[in-house]
Image: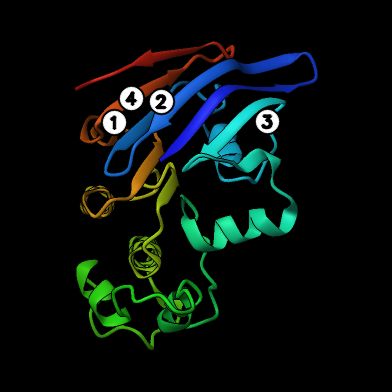
């Protein structure tokens, strides 16, 4: 579970959001929506400890992540966090297998590479170089990397923004399956289909004041 408590982020005089409270439970998917400039990516980065909030707390399973030192923050990202980017964030000159191996945690027994690739429709393609794959196929490799890692929290930033409808559906279906397996998923999106596939929605206003829109 991840909880944001009175989180505020500002850049000089501009306040993106102030005193934002938010909780995402394991097994749930939350969509962050709002106009460009409303701070969706920045909020994901604060949750993933890639940016520091101006004030407030980021709590994960009761631990205040925002108070941890750099080494413990790196361990959190290594052991618990999965990130899905619109630009895939793969090692392009490496093989599919090498990209999945990066996500394997020492001592853990997650699904194997073959199972993960089969789940995203890339069975038998471990030895192909990533730069030979299409954009949709690269995003499927990024999804397989999440399956291999099996993080407790997934942060996805516009993961379907550059994809056709079939690949976008694959992204949503895989994230939903990860949530069913106990992962908390937060997705920043402009896509109404992605928003509607989530359990709840949080809207961020362009001038920074958050407004919640929940669905049962």
Asked if disc 1 and disc 2 are in contact, CB closer than 8 Å, the reply is yes
In this rendering, is residue 124 above or below 31? below
* Viewer-nearest residue: 38 or 44: 44
Residue 52, image x, y percentages: 70, 37
At x 45%, y 46%, the residue is: 155
Tell me what residue is drawn at x 57 percent, y 35 percent: 58
Is the residue marked by circle 2 packed among few (<14), some (14-19), or many (20+) residues within 10 Å? Answer: many
Q: From this viewpoint, which residue is outermost toward the right?
A: 12
- The residue wearing badge 4 is 201
The residue at 27%/72% (across/down) is 116
Q: How far apart are marks 1 and 4 (CA)?
A: 7 Å
Cα distance between the residues tagged 3 and 1: 25 Å
Identify residue for label 3.
53
State which tag comes first along the sequence, 2 or 3: 2
Contact flag, marks 1 and 4 (Cβ < 8 Å) = yes
Residue position marked by numbered label 2 in the rendering: 33
Gap in Å between the C-alphas at discs 2 and 3? 19 Å
Check disc 1 and report the residue beneath it. 195
């Amino acid at each position: 579970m991840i909880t944001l408590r009175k989180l505020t982020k500002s850049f000089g005089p501009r306040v993106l959001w102030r005193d934002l409270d938010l909780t995402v439970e394991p097994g749930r998917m939350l969509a962050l929506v709002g106009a460009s400039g409303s701070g969706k990516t920045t909020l994901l980065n604060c949750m993933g400890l890639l940016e520091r909030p101006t004030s407030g707390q980021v709590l994960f399973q009761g631990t205040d992540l925002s108070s941890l030192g750099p080494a413990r923050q790196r361990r959190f990202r290594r052991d618990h966090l999965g990130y899905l980017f619109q630009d895939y964030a793969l090692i392009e000159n490496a093989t599919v297998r090498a990209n999945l191996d990066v996500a394997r945690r020492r001592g853990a027994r997650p699904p194997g590479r073959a199972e993960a690739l089969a789940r995203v429709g890339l069975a038998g393609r471990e030895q192909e170089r990533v730069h030979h794959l299409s954009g949709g196929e690269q995003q499927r490799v990024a999804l397989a990397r999440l399956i291999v890692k099996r993080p407790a929290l997934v942060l996805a930033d516009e993961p379907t923004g550059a994809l056709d409808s079939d690949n976008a559906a694959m992204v949503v279906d895989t994230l939903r399956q990860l949530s069913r397996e106990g992962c908390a998923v937060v997705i920043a999106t402009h896509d109404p289909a992605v928003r509607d596939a989530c359990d709840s929605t949080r809207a961020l206003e362009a001038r920074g004041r958050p407004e919640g829109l929940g669905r049962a």
